[in-house]
Image: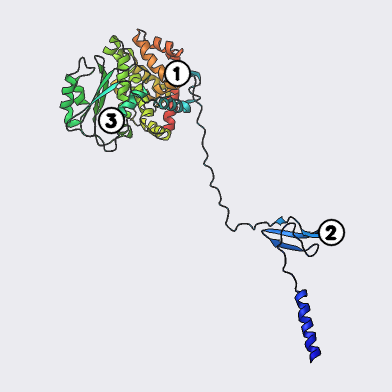
Amino acid sequence: MKRALALLVALSFMGTFLTVPATAAVKAGASCPKVGKTSVASGKTFTCVKSGKKLLWNKGIALTKPASSTPTPIASPTPKVEPLPPVPSSFSNLVTNYKGISVAVWQDVRNRLKGTTPVTKFEVFTGPQTGQPKDKPSVESLLGNASILLSSFSQPKVTKVFYFNRSDVSWAQEQHGKLTNPKFRAQELSDNCPSDSNCGAFGSTSAGVGAMFMGVHLQNLDPLEVFGGTEIHEFTHVVQCNLYSESVFNNPNKYLPGWFIEGQASAIQQAGGTSNYAEYLSSRKKWFSHSPKSVVKSYSAEEILTFFELQGPGKFDQATWSHVYDIGSFATEALIAVGGLDSTFELIKQVSSGKSFDEAFLATYKTPWSEAKTQIAEAVSREYGDAR
């Protein structure tokens, strides 16, 4: 019994010296137990290697992260952007590049709207029973844009603007009677505003003062009538009149074609009275909405040439007059595309200096009108075909 007890005590005493030490932390440079042994710690796999007489853990290799289970989103295809068509640079390539006419006009006109200061001072008057469309911005801002757009050209120091509806025609005629040497008759205000859904506008100068009579209707509205197109159209007439010599002012149609006078105002109206290029293209397409009249049955190049003849300087053809707005607009756009907007006002200056329309056209565009008109007629005819 004593011997067994002594042996048990001896073993217990020895056990205190045979206890296995705790495993040291696995890290690079720490001692390790056996060559080739591996251990994972801190995101790495360490291997025991012999370094001199010691066994040490190596630097370790980072573990590869498992692939994410979240599916990779598939990118939406990038919409294909169609390149803009090339713009014409002369009458000789006008037909070839007719699709670029709208691009040239849009860029020219919109660049001019980047200005900030109107040239003319607008004095705005509104008839006592006249209200504006509810979505229309302030008329002062729209009129200011019209002046900024045409700031490169001579403008009156003051332009008086009268807004009226059918109920205020008498009021508008009263204001007209206060003008000195007005460009049109008071009766025309009534004739041009026959109803609450059809009330037109006039723009001119009166003894050096701009005068705009803006008919307002709240039905059958075109966006151009709401967002400044009409203001631009009539103010273009103000600038035209301001550039006329006295003889031209007294009878503009004697010296300039009716299609040019109205076409210039309409072309600038389209590009200046729309908010983006797509809207501009849509508005242009609708401009070919007039029913074919008289000789204009299909908008062929031959018919358009006949129209140019019927509405030439000193001529007036009632049957085809409505086409001074659509054909006139597209024909003037062709002039803008070739020579810039400045060229169309230079044409007015040349006529006011005493030249005939043909002489003024040659001086401005270095191409005879007799040659240019055939290219313009073909280009306009193709644009009509695209619109249809």
Residue 78 position (above or below residue 363) = below
Please identify the quarter of the rendering in which residue 50 is found. Answer: bottom right
- Circle 2 is placed at which residue position? 53
Residue 371 x, y percent position in the rendering: 45, 15
Image point 53% across, 42% down: which residue? 78
The three-letter code of the residue at mark 3 reads: Val
- The residue to which callout 1 is attached is 339
Whichever of callouts 1 and 2 sits on the residue coming sooner in the sequence is: 2
Quadrant into which the C terminus falls: top left
If you read the primary sequence from the N terminus, does the residue marked by circle 2 or circle 3 appear first? 2
- Distance between the Cα atoms at labels 3 and 1? 31 Å
Q: 248 or 30, which lies in front?
A: 30
- Quadrant into which the N terminus falls: bottom right
> Mark number for residue 139?
3
Distance from disc 1 to disc 2, alpha carbons, whole Å, reads 92 Å
Q: Secondary structure at mark 3?
A: helix
Gap in angstroms between the C-alphas marked 2 and 3:
95 Å
- Rendering coords of residue 71 (x, y %): 57, 56
Identify the secondary structure beneath mark 1.
helix
Crowd around label 1: few <14 · some 14–19 · many ≥20 (10 Å): some
Horizontally, residue 65 falls left or right of residue 86, namely right
Residue 255 percent location from the top left of the image: 33, 12
Q: Label 2 sits on what residue type?
A: Lys
**In the image, what residue occupies the spot 41% across and 34% down?**
276
* Image x and y of residue 270, in percent: 37, 28
